[in-house]
Image (cartoon, rainbow, N blue to C red):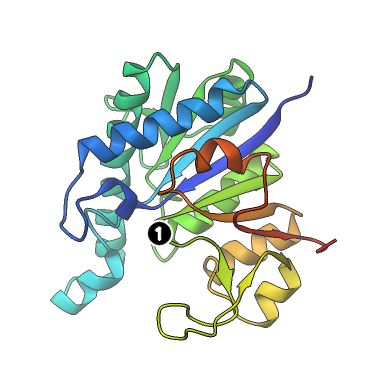
Amino acid sequence: MKKKRIVLKISGEALGNDGLQGINHLKVKEIAKEIKDLYDLGNTELSVVVGAGNIWRGRDAIDCGIERSSADYMGMLATILNALALQSALETLGCDTRVMTSLSIPSVAEPYIRRKALSHLEKDRIVIFGGGNGIPFFTTDTTAALRAAELGAKMILMAKNGVDGVYDKNPKTNKEAKKLTKLTHKDVLENHLEVMDLTAATLCAENNIDIYVFDMNKKGNISKAANDFSFGTLISSNNK
């Protein structure tokens, strides 16, 4: 059976302390267990992109007078901290993992090399990408889209922290907001739906990469998301 190659995008906030900065190791362990459940299904080649919102948000730092490029590089370093924490939790569960980074820190993790990443996936290792794209002015959403395109993954699982899909209006401020279960890439781009940033959404559209948006906080959702599209929003080239 040919395995599906999937990129799982996890927000940094999901690894944090409910609004406080830092890494919540209990949450990291919980997420690691969920990722292992997905891995144990045996039908996926899995890579993970982690954000840094629990430690550092580059766009917020600008208000403190930090220049944008420097703030973004600080955010990239923060994603590496999260990647290493997740790696440790997964390895405690017996998973074979590799952390690969866009920033060169050879004593900490492997540099990202496409062919090496493919080799790890083919050997059933979970590859965790830290360091973003290695250049400022891009988000980790774009990293997920870029890695999916480079590695030939046809699905990005957008594991949201408390958001169970895409809505036509903001559900937090509008009680009449309706959840959209199926969308096309064209819908997302033309209606400026905030699924991911514009660059990432365009990359997915151009490379026919499906996106599944779901709430990762409900137990079992991460392992279900690769095969069950009934509880979130599926974005694809067509909405049939």
Q: Quadrant of the N terminus?
A: top right
**Left or right relative to 4: residue 22:** left
Of 238 and 145, which appears nearest the observer? 238
Residue 47 drawn above or below residue 40 = below
Tag 1 secondary structure: loop
Q: Position of residue 209 (x, y in %)?
A: 71, 52
Residue 143 drawn above or below residue 185 = above
Of 106 and 60, which appears nearest the observer? 60
Residue 16, can we see it? yes
Amino acid carrying label 1: it is Gly
Q: Position of residue 23 (x, y in %)?
A: 20, 44
**Left or right relative to 230: residue 25:** left
Of 235 and 81, which appears nearest the observer? 235
Residue labelled with disc 1: 162
Q: Residue at x 30, y 31 (%)?
A: 29
Residue 148 quadrant: top right
Q: Position of residue 99 (x, y in %)?
A: 40, 29
Residue 111, can we see it? no
Q: Residue at x 40, y 28 (%)?
A: 33
Q: Position of residue 72 (x, y in %)?
A: 31, 61
Q: Residue at x 37, y 51 (%)?
A: 51
Q: Residue at x 74, y 61 (%)?
A: 206
Q: Residues within 10 Å of mark 1 (few under 14, many from 20)?
A: few
Residue 83 quadrant: top left
**Left or right relative to 109: residue 154:** right
Q: Quadrant of the C terminus?
A: bottom right
